[in-house]
Image (cartoon, rainbow, N blue to C red):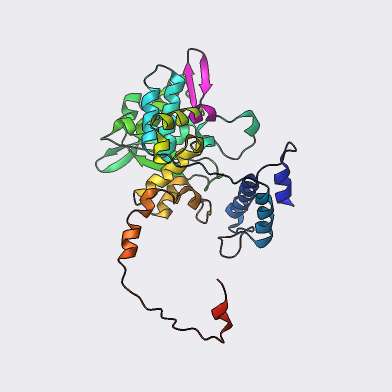
Amino acid sequence: MLGGRIWKGKRGRAVGAGMVQAGLGGFNTTIALERGTQPFHQIDRQSYIKPIQHMLAGFNFFDPATEKKLACHPDLPDFAREHAYKGKSTAQHATGDLIVIAFYFLLRIGEYTAGTKRKKKTRRRQFREKDVTFFKQKKGMLTALPRDTPAEEIMMADAATLRISNKKNGHAGASVHHWALTNEPNKCPVRALGRRVAHIRRHATNGNALLCAFWDQMGRGDVTGGMVRFSVKYAAAVLDYPVRGILIDRIDTHSLHSGGACALSVAGFKPHEIMKMGRWAPNSLSFMEYIQQQLSTFSAGMSDAMSKIKPFTNMEGATNSDDLRAGTIH
């Protein structure tokens, strides 16, 4: 069975139940994107079919519980960028800017960092310099800036768009658009994107260079997931995240993606708007995993509102003792 093959692992080492579920989810999403159906789920699209539920329950019995990474706050990417620019390292500058971009544009780690040797075969593609378009507002209309626009004008852009080149998540040609934070340029994702593009264009002209590329006295380099992970954990430690109930062990690169989604949700944006920004498929079930319900803001005022409801009448009334459904546990 497919689940058993995933559980055995590529190197003969058994993986955790969470990895099996993630693997099945990947197969399920691939089929759903191509055919519009989810073969591993029941009709309600909320639960796996019974055989898969039983299989995962068996794996979970021998597997310690998996803990999802927690969402970060908007102050983490801001601190990471500020700390990166205290030094003169081009690699640190690139890492700081990419953390800001990843948080606001809801990017996945493989989309803005260089791939590792173990993960060469993947449908996910990194964003390139030519996937970025900057806009300037003129007479109430947004006008795309040409590719040969000077760096000074790019840094004054009013908005920017990232366009995805394949359909690993969402669909090919999907784009993510953001307006510039004119009142807070240091926190602005459009300014961070402008710094990345301006740096790349000084060293490469064909547009195929990845957003994670940088050049220093040693030559060309790429920002890796490990570099982002170290910066994110360091920022969380300095900002004293454990006091907020967020352990450092549960902060990772995934926290930027989840943090951006949670920030949009807390700010009042609707689920379909967040799904559009994060490029989730319309029928994606994984989307809700990113909106972490343990955030205190989601339950703010709930107990007060619950205590003030008016008495209500149960319209079903008394059940008939002969009605077998009355004794059914739902």
Q: Is residue 126 left or right of residue 316?
A: right
> Could you tell me if residue 18 is visible in this image?
yes
Residue positioned most to the top: 217
Quadrant in which residue 177 is drawn: top left
Q: Is residue 129 above or below residue 124?
A: above
Residue 50 on image: x %, y %: 66, 62
Q: Nearer the viewer, residue 270 or 300?
A: 300
Q: Is residue 23 above or below residue 193?
A: below
Residue 67 on image: x %, y %: 55, 44
Which residue: 75% across, 38% down?
A: 12
Q: Nearer the viewer, residue 303 or 220?
A: 303
Q: Nearer the viewer, residue 2 or 111?
A: 2
Residue 227 lies in the magenta-colored region: yes
Tell me the quadrant of the picture where the C terminus can be found: bottom right
Q: Is residue 183 left or right of residue 30?
A: left
Quadrant in which residue 325 is drawn: bottom right
Which residue: 43% across, 20% down?
A: 202
Q: What is the span of residues highlighted in magenta in the rendered image?
A: 210-229
> Could you tell me if residue 194 is visible in this image?
no
Residue 264 on image: x %, y %: 38, 47
Q: Is residue 292 left or right of residue 58?
A: left
Q: Is residue 254 above or below residue 26?
A: above
Residue 292 lies in the magenta-colored region: no
Which residue: 42% across, 23% down?
A: 93
Which residue: 42% across, 49% down?
A: 274
Residue 32 on image: x %, y %: 59, 54
Q: How many numbered callouts?
A: 0
